[in-house]
Image (spheres, grey):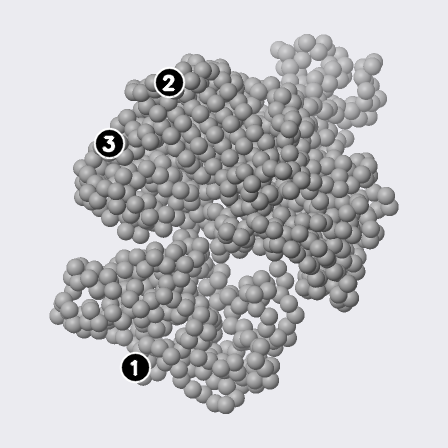
Amino acid sequence: MIPATFEYVRAASVEEAVRALASAGEDAKVLAGGQSLMPLLRLRLAYPDALVDLDRVAELREIREDGDHLVIGSMATHHQVMRDPLVRRHAPLIAQATATVADPAVRHRGTFGGSLAHADPAGDLPAVALALDAVFLVRSRRGEREIPAADFFVDWMTTAMEPDEIMTGVRVPRLGEGWGFHYEKFHRTAQAWAIVGVACAVRRERGAIEDVRVALTNMGPTPVRATAVERFAGGRSVSDDMFRAASERAAEGTGAPTDLHGSGEYREHLAKVLTARALRAAAAT
Amino acid sequence: MSEISPEGLAEQAERAPRSEPDPGREVGQPRRRSEDARLVSGRTRWTDNLNPAGTLHVAFLRSPHAHARITRVDVEAARRVPGVVAAFGGADLAEEQGSLPCAWTVTEDMKVPAHPPLAVTEARYVGEPVACVVARHRYAAVDALEEIDVDYEPLPAVVHMEEALREGGPLVHQELETNQAYRWVFENGDLDAAFRDAPVLLERRYVQQRLIPTAMEPRAVLCEPDGDDFTLYSATQIPHILRLMLATVTQIPEHRIRVVAPDVGGGFGSKLQVYGEEVLCLLLARRLGRPVKWTESRSEGNMATHHGRDQIQRLTLAAERDGRVRGVKVDLLADMGAYLMLVTPGIPLLGAFMFNGIYKMDAYSFTCTGVFTTKTPTDAYRGAGRPEATFAIERLMDELAAELGLDPIEVRRRNWIGHGEFPYETVAGLTYDSGNYEAATDRALALFEYDKLRAEQADRRERRDVVQLGIGVSTYTEMCGLAPSRVLGSLAYGAGGWEHASVRILPSGKIEVVTGSSAHGQGHETAWAQIAADRLGVPFEDVKVLHGDTAVAPKGMDTYGSRSLAVGGIALYQACDRVVDKARRVAAHLMEASEQDLEFSGGRFAVRGAAAEGPSIQEVALAAFAAHDLPDGVEPSLDADATFDPGNFSFPHGTHLCAVEVDTETGRTRIRSYVAVDDVGHVVNPLIVEGQVHGGLAQGIAQALYEEAVYDADGNLTTTTMADYLVPSAADLPEFVTDRTETPATSNPLGVKGVGEAGTIASTPAVVNAIVDALRHHGVTDVPMPCTPERVWRALREAFREDPDPNPSAAPGAGGGLGSAGGAR
C-alpha cells in the first residue's frame, strides 16, 4: 500500500528535530527507524501530517556509561544494542531480549528508542525497560525531563511523552554481581510478536532471592510488572516449588488481550508457565 | 535407489558441467538453475518492473462488507483529484465487462452465478472490487480512492458452510434460491456390505482450514493497447488460457490479444485464474488508449486473490480386526466462496479419486457438496484436492492403528498395494501404473531411526516428561501430470490436458526450445535445456528455452497440477526425436549412406561400424537451412513440433515421517526431525527436485502448524497482513532429510512423475499425526489445524478433564494403551 501524503523533515541534530517537531503541530510523528511506523502508514492506519526523521542525528546513536547507569541513545539500532559490549556486560537482559526482536533486517533499521516510544505492549523492549526501572530522557523546546518507566507507558501505544517531545536516550541501571537475567519469549514464528513474554531479573544471595523484577509483555494495554510474583519470591529460598508457587500469581492484575494468536485465558496460563521458566533461568545464570 | 544429501548435492552442483557437458548425460545432473541469478536479484522482467511510456495506474476500491447491496457509487470527487484521469463504478462498465468465467461445470445442474469484474448491484465478499480510479501515478490513484462515496445496504453475511445449507437462511445469491452450488457423487463397490457388521467403524470429522496462497510476487497486470490489438502482461500461470478467456469475456477477438507472462514469482495455484483486475485493465486500456497497470498490495492480495482448501470432511472407515480396510465413505462440504471462478467447483473433485490413498479396499463412496458463502472465492492451491484427501486417509490410518493397538506402519503394510501388483486399478477407478511403497517406507524408516525414536517416546512417557515426543506417518500417493484430455472431458472440464513443444535449430547451430508450459519459478529454462541437450547431443549452453508469451509460444495449456515435466517435458522429448529423425534423412543424403545404417550418438551421425565420424546435428541443421542439397521432397530446416496428451496421470508416492516434540505446558510443537523419501520416477535435475520437495514440505507444514485465513462472524477477513497470517520462514522449519527411490512411471518415455505438489500433499498429515501421537496417551485424538499452541493446550486440557489420570506407562506407538479413547464413536 501507499501512505497518504505527509511532510518530511530530516533533522541533522536534536535541536533541529525538536524545533521541527514543535512547528509541525499535534499530528506530527517522529521517524526512528520506521519498522513499526511505516507499516502503519502504508496500511493507512496512521495519517500523520509530518514525519521528523531522526536517522541522521548521530549523537542519538551513542551508548555510554553514566556512573551507576548506562545511557542508551534512542537511535541506537537493535543490531547495535545487542552487540554492544557495555550493554552485554551491564544490561544483558536488554541484549538478550533485543536479539529476539523480529528478524535481522528489522534489527538493522529498527531502533531502541523507536520501539519504546511506539509502546506496543506486544513489543519486547517495553517490558524489559519496565523490569529494569529504566528512566526515559526526553527533550522538547521547553527543555529536558526524565520519565521513569513506571510512568512512561500510559495506555496501548501511548506514552507519557508530549507530542512535541523527542526521546533522546534511556538510562538503565548497571546491575552487577549476583544478578541473573532472562527474557522468555513465546511466539508462533520467529518473526512474530510475542504472544506473551516475561522479562526477569533476580539477585541471589546465599540461596535466597534478595531482589526480583518481573515484567510481562502483551498481558495488557501496557507492559505490566508482575508485582504479586515479585512480592512472593522476594526473600524466599530458591527452589523449583517456590518459583512455581510464585508464578501462579503471574496473571494477577493483568488484562490479557484476546486476539488471533491467543485468548486472554491462554495468555494467563502462559504467563504463569513462562514466569516459572524465566525465574528458573534467571536464577541459574 | 539413490542416496542424496544436501552436501552431496551442493558438491555435485559444484562439479556440474558448465561449458563442457558430457553429451547424453545432462538428464540427472543437479545443475544450478540458469534463471536464478536474475530471478533472485530481481533484475528482471517482473510485470511491475515494466513501465511503457505514458503508463496509467489503476487502484481498486474494495467492499468493506461481506455482503451488501450497492445503492450508489459516486466517483465525481475522485475524478477531481489532481493526477486522476478517470474513475468508474461497476455500473459504468456494466455493459462491457462481462462475467468472469468458470471452466468446470461439474454437474449439469451446477449453479453458476454472474460474476462481474466490478460489482454492480451487490458485493459478496470483503475485498470485492466495487470501483476503480485511473491516474498518472499510483499515489494519486490510491489517494483518490478515499474520495469515492459508496452507499451500501448491508445484507446478512453467510460465513459457515453448515449454516449456509440450512433451509430458510440468508442467501449469497438471491436469484439462485440456494447456497448449494452442486452435489457430486462417486461410488464404487458395495458400501453397504462393507459397512454392515464391520468389526471396526471409525467416524471422524476433519476441517481443512482456509489458506491464502501467498506467492512471493503479488499479482500485477499491465495492458498496452496498439490500435485494435492489446498486449496484456500479467503475473499469471496461464497465459494461454487467460488469452482465450479474456477474448470470451470481453468479446475482443482472440487474435487481437497477446498475453505475456514475463518472469512470474510463484503462484501455487493462485495465478491459475482469470481475475477481474486482468479483464478491467484490458477494458480500461481500450477505453483510455494508453497503457494501464495495476499491482496488488499484500493486504489487497490476502482479500482478493483466491484462497485455497476450506473443506469440512465427514469420514467413515470400515475395517477388519486385523486392520484390513473394507471401505471408506467420504462426505465433503467444500467452500466455494462467493463466486465460481476458473476451476473453483472442480478443485475438491481432484481429491475424489485419492481418498483411498495407496490402499486396497472393496468399496468407496464420495460425495461433495459445493457451498456458497460470502467469502473470497476459493480455487486451486498447491495440491488442489489431493492434500485434503491425503490428509483424511492418512489421519484415518493412524486412527485405525490406534484403535487396534497396532503400529501405524504395520497397518499401512497390511493395506497397501504390493510392489508386484502394479498396474493396479483402484477402488476410485484410477490405474496406478507403478510404485514401490515397500522400498520408500523401508528407506524412510532407516533414515528416521524409527525404532530409536519409539524407544525415546516410551521413555518420555514413562518419565512424564513435560515435552512429549510424537511420530507421524504419511505414506502418500497423488495423481498429477494433469491430465489425459479424455479424462478431463469425462469430468466435464472445459479444455484438454495436452502440452506442446517445438524445437528450432538456428543456422548457427544454437537451439530454441519453445514450450507451452509457462514457468513461474519451477526452473523450466534449466530442466528443458537439459532434456534437449541430451536428446539432440548438443551442449547445455546452446539451448535457449522460450515460454510465457502467446506470440512466442502460441500453443500451450500452461503450468499447474505438477504437469510441466510429465506432460510438457514429454512433448519436448518427442519434438527432439522428430528433429533427429529428419536430421537422419538429411545426414544420410549428405553422407551418401542409407538411413538404416546411421547411428546417432553424442550429437553426431556415423555409419554403424565405420570409424569415420559423420556430421553433427548442428552441421546437418545448417545444411537443412541452406537447403542447397536436400533429398527430394524434404523441406528446408529441421524444426519440429510435438503435442503430448498423456494416457494416464502420473502417481508420485513416498513415505514421510515426522517427529515432533510437544511442550505439554504451553502446547507448542517443535518439529524434531523430518524424513521425506519420495518416488518421483526418473529425475531430470535432482537439485530442482530437492527444491520442490523443500518448498512443498514448508507449505504442507504451514497448513499443519501456522496458516489460517480467519473470518469473523460478520464475514470480515481478519488475517489481511502477514503479521496475522503466519507464513513460516526458514527459521521456523527443521532441517529436512530427503531421499528418493526411483520407480519409473510407465506412462511416459522419460519415466518421470510430477514433483511440484508432492511435498505439500504428504507433509500435513505427517505433522498432525505426530502431534496426536505425542498426546494420545493423554486421551487426545485430534487437534484442529493449524495446530497452534493454544489449540494443542486446549486439546490436552479437554482430555485431562475427561481422564485426569492417564496411564503414563502406555506402550509406545499410535496404538499404545488407549483403550477406547481413540476408538469408534
Residue farthest along the right direction in this orientation: B227
For the point 52% across and 78% down, the residue is A57
Kind of residue at disc 3? Gly
Q: Is residue B773 left or right of residue B589?
A: left
Please say whether residue B110 is visible from this viewpoint: yes
Q: Chain of mark 2?
A: B
Q: Is the residue marked by circle 2 packed among few (<14), some (14-19), or many (20+) residues within 10 Å?
A: few
Amino acid type, mark 2: Arg
Furthest residue to the bottom?
A142
In this view, B244 is above or below A267:
above
Element on which disc 3 rests: loop
- For mark 2, what is the residue? B196
Q: Disc 2 vs disc 3: which is toward the camera? A: 2
Label 1: how many residues lie within 10 Å, few (<14), some (14-19) or many (20+)? few
The quarter of the picture where residue A265 lies is bottom left
Q: Relative to the observer, which residue lies in front, A281 or A244?
A: A244
Q: Is residue B626 above or below residue B668?
A: above
The x and y percentages for residue B731 are 42, 51
Name which of mark 2 and mark 3 comes first in the sequence.
2
Residue B337: image quadrant is top right
Q: Are marks 1 and 3 in contact (CB under 8 Å)?
A: no
Give the Cα separation between the discs numbered 2 and 1: 81 Å
Mark number, residue B157: none
Quadrant holding the C terminus of chain B: top left
Q: Is residue B667 left or right of residue B684?
A: left
| Badge 2 and badge 3 in a common chain | yes
Q: Which residue position is annotated with label 3?
A: B819
Amino acid type of the residue tagged 1 in the rendering: Asp
Residue shown at 40%/42% (left/top)? B784
Please name which of the two marks, 2 or 1, marks the residue nearer to the observer. Answer: 2
Q: Is residue B770 above or below residue A154?
A: above
Contact? badges 2 and 3 (CB < 8 Å):
no
